[in-house]
Amino acid sequence: MGLMGYGNSWRAHRRLFHQYFRSTIVFTYHPSSTKAVREMIRRLRDTPDHFMRHIRFMAGSNILRIVYGMEVESEDDPNLALVEEGIKIVSRIANAGAYLVDSFPIMQHIPAWFPGAQFKRDGARWKPIVEEMFTRPYKELKASFDNGDPKPCVLTSMLYNISQDEEDPNRSMLEDVVINTSGTTYIAASDTTTSTLHTFVLAMSMHPELQKRAQEELGDIVGQDRLPEMGDRDALPFITAIVKECLRWRPALPLASPHRSVTDDEYEGFYIPAGSLVIGNAWAILHDKERYPDPDTFNPSRFINREGRLRKDVPDPTEAFGWGRRICPGRYFFLDLAWLAAANILAVFSIEKPIDELGNVVEPSGEYTTGLFSFPVPFKATFKVRSNVGVLV
């Protein structure tokens, strides 16, 4: 449950993940993502007060369907509950500095009963849950695969590939890679999508003028007879700019994922000894005044030129996904899903700040949680169905 060192194992995991989520393959997941988004829209229409839960369910159920072939119908589904619990644990463990052992690695040798060894006691308690999160969905899918009833999904494709050579001496290792890669996919996709779309709802409620501009763009391009689809993205640059600005303004992983240096290194005169914990400050980069003037202001127009097209001279907020050879390989899948969800929400609803029983506008705090993943502190928003598109839901 620690950081995976760079080496053959890491390269095998990375290669397998990239194989199924590279930019040239993610279009095959658009039908599933469209289904998940449309289901979310109906839930938002019926019970808008639970929008945060509906967004999380959309992200989670979609990735379970794509990776494991699971059709999750309810937010109370036990498989969904299991992986959500596993995510909470993994996020806490991966949070740099959560335990003293992060700063003093020698503590890994102390017994579990010793003062300061809470990390060992927590690990013993959490390990079965995390292992179950990775193995239970795999075992269920593997049983169907072995019985000749394979479900169409990413994991089935992985199993088919490793089953082609039963004499392969690395087959056992490859199976472990498949289990870990498929399980990690949910962790990578769910919280990033959920955090970004919560930020999207918050930003739209705070900036009705930007919301109106996006809806006018939708009206001009998509019209009122259908809902937006992935094929509309190139013609809807302002919605793309809104998604980019959500990533820049409030990145889901403000300090990215921690890494350790494998060798002694030096950066701009600073000596970095091998074994040092290195934390990339995505927040600082994405709020650099030189790259993004007035960085604390939510302003999608910074990505739009005078002709209304996306600017090429303003850096994309790719640091929200990390950098280097460890940059998130699932970023193309995420960007597609986030864009589709944002476009459909704007097409169907007007998002407003709520009004209390005295008729006063309830202002969101704008505060965010701390940790590996950062989320808006729970807030309220009103989703009003736009009269001209209500019949499409």
Image: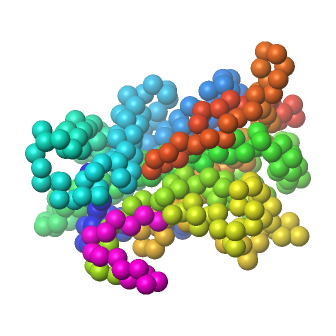
| Residue range highlighted in magenta | 266-280
Magenta stretch containing residue 242, yes or no?
no
For the residue pair 147 and 239, the one nearer the viewer reads as 239
Res 239 → quadrant = bottom right
- Front one among 290 and 136: 290
When asked about the image quadrant of residue 6, the answer is bottom left
Residue 28 visible somewhere in the drawing:
no
Q: Residue at x 70, y 73 (%)?
A: 290
Quadrant housing the C terminus: top right
Is there any visible trace of residue 250 in the rendered image? yes
Q: What percent of the width, then of the height, locates residue 36?
A: 58, 40
| Residue 261 in picture, x, y percent from top left | 32, 72
For the residue pair 44 and 34, the one nearer the viewer reads as: 44
**Position of residue 113 measured from the top left corner of the image (x, y, whole percent):** 12, 38
Q: Is residue 251 above or below residue 195?
A: below
Q: In this view, does 278 lie above or below 384?
A: below
